[in-house]
Image: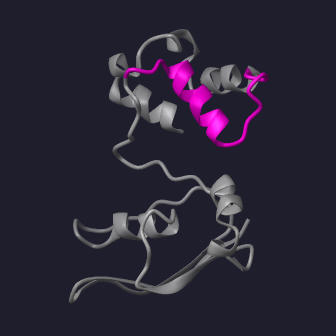
């Protein structure tokens, strides 16, 4: 897997938040460090295509991600600090909903149980997300 950001810039009005950021990522897990206001969240939102860059390109496997956005989204994950769950859903219902949105088979939900076991939420899968701790919500978001 190769993800490359090239000359990413972002402006809000006259304020430049990011200027000419370039980096290659080849598999693995990465962290982004910097002081408050340095543009870390902005850059992550641009890479996740939640926010549009003012300039620059994002390429996945040497193709512009906007040429196959659905394919890109199926390969790259981003877990924001605040996750927008439907808190009246159970953990299982939320996973089932996301499974369907991603094109999963409505009849084959075995994978949902497996994923809930992997993130240690299987025993509370029938509890409302509103009752989950912050860490449990983060694991569900993964």
Left or right, 120 with reference to 33: right
Query: Is residue 6 at least partly visible in the picture?
Result: no
Q: Position of residue 33 (x, y in %)?
A: 37, 65
Region rendered in magenta: 88-109
- Determine which quarter of the picture holds residue 45: bottom left
Left or right, 62 with reference to 139: right
Residue toward you, 69 or 32 = 69
Residue toward you, 135 or 92 = 92
Q: Position of residue 99 (x, y in %)?
A: 65, 34
Instruction: Look at the picture and state if 114 lies above or below 78.
Output: above
Residue at screen point 34% across, 23% down: 133
Q: Position of residue 136 (x, y in %)?
A: 43, 26
Residue at screen point 41% across, 34% down: 85
Left or right, 67 with reference to 121: right
Residue toward you, 133 or 130 = 130
Taking the magenta stretch, the answer to whether it contains residue 126 is no
Instruction: Look at the picture and state if 95 lies above or below 35.
Output: above
């Amino acid at each position: 897997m190769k993800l490359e950001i090239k000359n990413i810039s972002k402006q809000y009005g006259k304020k430049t938040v990011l200027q000419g950021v370039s980096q290659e990522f080849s598999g693995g897990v990465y962290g982004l460090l910097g002081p408050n206001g340095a543009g870390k969240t902005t850059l992550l939102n641009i890479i996740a295509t939640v926010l549009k860059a003012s300039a620059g390109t994002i390429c996945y496997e040497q193709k512009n991600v906007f040429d196959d956005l659905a394919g890109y989204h199926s390969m790259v994950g981003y877990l924001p600090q605040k996750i927008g769950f439907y808190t009246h859903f159970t953990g299982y219902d939320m996973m089932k909903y996301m499974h369907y949105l991603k094109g999963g088979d409505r009849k084959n939900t075995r994978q949902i149980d497996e994923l809930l076991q992997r993130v240690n939420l299987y025993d509370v899968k029938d509890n409302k997300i509103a009752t989950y701790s912050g860490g449990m919500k983060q694991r569900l978001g993964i």
